[in-house]
Amino acid sequence: MIITLTDTSTAKISTALLRARRNAGSPAQGMVLTLLVVCDEKEYESALKAATESGREHPARILLIVTASGRVASLDAEVRLGEGTPGEVVVIRMRGPLASQPASVVRPLLLPDSPVVIWWPGKAPSNIADDELAGLAVRRVTDAASAKRPLAELKTRAATYQPGDTDLSWTRLTRWRALLAASLDQYPARILGATVEAERNSPSADLLAAWLQSCLRVKVRRKITAGPGMTAVRMSTAAGDIAITRSDGLLASYTVPGQPERLVALKRRKPPS
Amino acid sequence: MTPPTTERVNLLRDPLDRRLPRIAGPCVLVIFGVTGDLSTKKLMPAVYDLANRGLLPPGFALVGFARREWEHQDFAKIVHDAVRQHARTPFREEVWKQLSEGIRFVPGEIGDDDSVRRLRDTIAELDEARGTGGNHAFYLSIPPGLFQTVVDQLREHGLAEQRYGQWSRVVIEKPFGHNLASARELNRVVSSVFPSSSVFRIDHYLGKETVQNMMALRFANQLFEPVWNNNYVDHVQITMAEDIGIGGRAGYFDGIGIARDVIQNHLLQLLALTAMEEPTSFEAAQLRAEKQKVLAAARPPERMDLHTARGRYTGGWQGGSKVAGYLEEKGIPASTTTETYAAIRVDIDNRRWAGVPFYLRTGKRLARRVTEIALGFKRAPHLPFTATDTEELGYNALVLRIQPDEGVTLRFGAKVPGTQMEIREVNMDFAYGGSFTESSPEAYERLILDVLLGDPPLFPQHEEVELSWQILDPILDYWASTDTPPQDYEPGGWGPGCATEMLARDGHVWRRP
């Protein structure tokens, strides 16, 4: 069910949510968090899709906040419930002066007690710590890779980092990190050095290099390749390299000294679009 | 070249890094009885799903062993089709490529030395080509009667040896024997070759997820534990109902019966998880210690004639179609006394549960498929209402729904809106998540992963299996001695009249799940 509310207020949105839930037959919903998604009209479609996907694993009240500039303040909303929508989705469009005061609209719509997560699929505020909406959330998700200058963005994040900040360029690395850690479980050799190979603008590659450097306490080289994304990680041992190479962004080959080369599925991770 | 032998801390692992999953080391999974339903519907899809989640090692190999003249490709095709049809995660070509590299098939017969030699050679070839380094898991998806032969052969051909830096594990499925004596014999056979930490018993009804959900509910909350005892709980009903008949399993089912098939392992495990004390930690060993304690304190009823019931479904209409009675099923002898419904009362002799009966029931061709644990609470000692006000008020109940729709229901009294003072029962429901469970790992995935990682399983070890038989054996003996067939019951209902009477004697009524 989709309920469209034009020129509305928070109270009307709350009422629409309550009524929609009653109509759906069940006033109780096992929602575990409120997910705030802050984006503009261009990102709206893909952000909605990704948020809905994540709602399938963690039933949530998803508030999509779409801001636009303008002279007159206006507030429109769209309540979506049931019919393939897990939990509840509210698309809130704010224009004009209101767009700079989003917390006033959002605060009454947060689920009681449950954690609040905020995600900026596109441009995030330069200092998250100062952002009013971010102040409502316990977990703040950004994506340096979506910025025009990803590395500069990553540096900004690092400079203003607080516990609870997460950048997707880090979570994209989990499979790589898991494989690398597993390779050292199997082959516990002393690592003498390492190389991370990736396309030029890859914040993930830089994070991985930094991670390896800080864990292994060795020099990690960063090599530029044509991509896509990360193409290889090599850790050198006395007996040869432990290497994971992936040239097509899908299937990697995995080598450990003295053992046969093997294939491993290693698809690039990205939100659905 | 062998890996460096010095123990070195893995610098990439940090206990605070919860994001990083553990991936098993390269290994071979050998499935005996790979042509069975279970293997195509559950095992192969689970293996694929694990690979898709990035939890299988790059050097993983899957070996099928069965009496078929198949080549490796034929078997790979079968696995491919099984995955396409039954896997829970989407099919992806690159994941399949990773898996298919390590798929092998060994045609052969259990008990034939040449076949096992071929199996050994195949495994040796894989150890070389895939770098699986002597780590092997054997999944025995075969009748228990063949276990002895298989484990003996594995030992003779050196496949069961526990060498330093390598592992060899075995997975067996329920039933774990058909009474105490046969369970002990089974354990003797398996443990003569594999140490108990290398034996994984799977009860596919009871996933690790369910066990952990129950642990979390009971021990992560302050709310439930204070009332989780005989001061507040009146009685407990544990139900596992199936809406299907025995299907094509006549050969397996007749002579075994549903009490052996379901109560011994599944319902008594649920009872143990419900009734046990808090373990000192959630390590498998501690959990098992508590389960064993409570199973040792549980006993069958003194009056078997009053507190057990069994039934057998007749033909009739169920769920909109005409179904055959048990005696009309293919391959069932007319003289059979096998039960398709069983209900028993179990008492637990300890401070927490003395005086609280646990009613266990299970049956086939019942109204719907459901597994649940329901704690019925005592009525309030005093009700400041008139009797007519509370006419519709039963007792408070906390229901742990295991399947389908895993979740928790709390039933309590609430006022009927209006000018009259009237109280009726209402439900408060929590679901672990409808669509959420679709993509979450399934029992077999968790089990296979535990086997490959060598995580001590939450599944029962032989002590628990034997304790369960000690509870059930006297009841089975009693039933065998009565010489009367089980009472008939209509399909699509909730079992025979004698089960209703059994509860009525204690002043209780079966819940309608």
Image (cartoon, coloured by chain):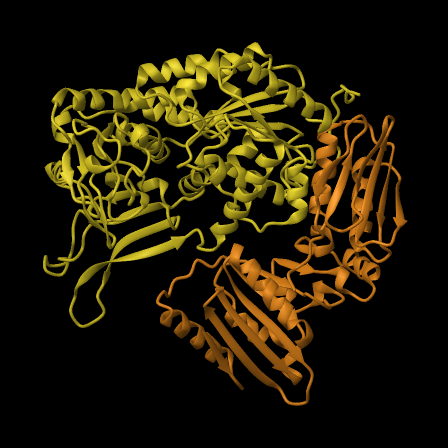
Chain colours: A orange, B yellow
Q: Where in the figure is residue B323, as x and y percent of width and height?
A: 23, 46
Query: At 66% from the left edge and 54% from the top edge, which residue is drawn?
Result: A164
Residue farthest toward the bottom in the current orientation of the protein: A72
Residue A3 left/right relative to B91: left
Query: At 89% from the left edge and 48% from the top edge, which residue is drawn?
Result: A223
Between B407 and A267, which is closer to the camera in this rendering?
A267
* Residue A225 appears in view: yes
Between B349 and B48, which is closer to the camera in this rendering?
B48
Q: Where in the figure is residue A19, as x and y percent of width and height?
A: 39, 74
Residue B208 left/right relative to A93: left
Depicted A262 relative to depicted B400: above or below: above
Residue A132 left/right relative to B68: right
Q: Where in the figure is residue B259, as x and y percent of width and height?
A: 26, 30
Q: Where in the figure is residue B282, as x and y percent of width and height?
A: 49, 32
Which quarter of the rendering shows the N terminus of chain B? top right
Q: In which quarter of the image is residue B308?
A: top left
Depicted A21 relative to depicted B76: above or below: below
Query: At 52% from the left edge and 77% from the top edge, which residue is drawn?
Result: A78
Residue B500 left/right relative to A59: left
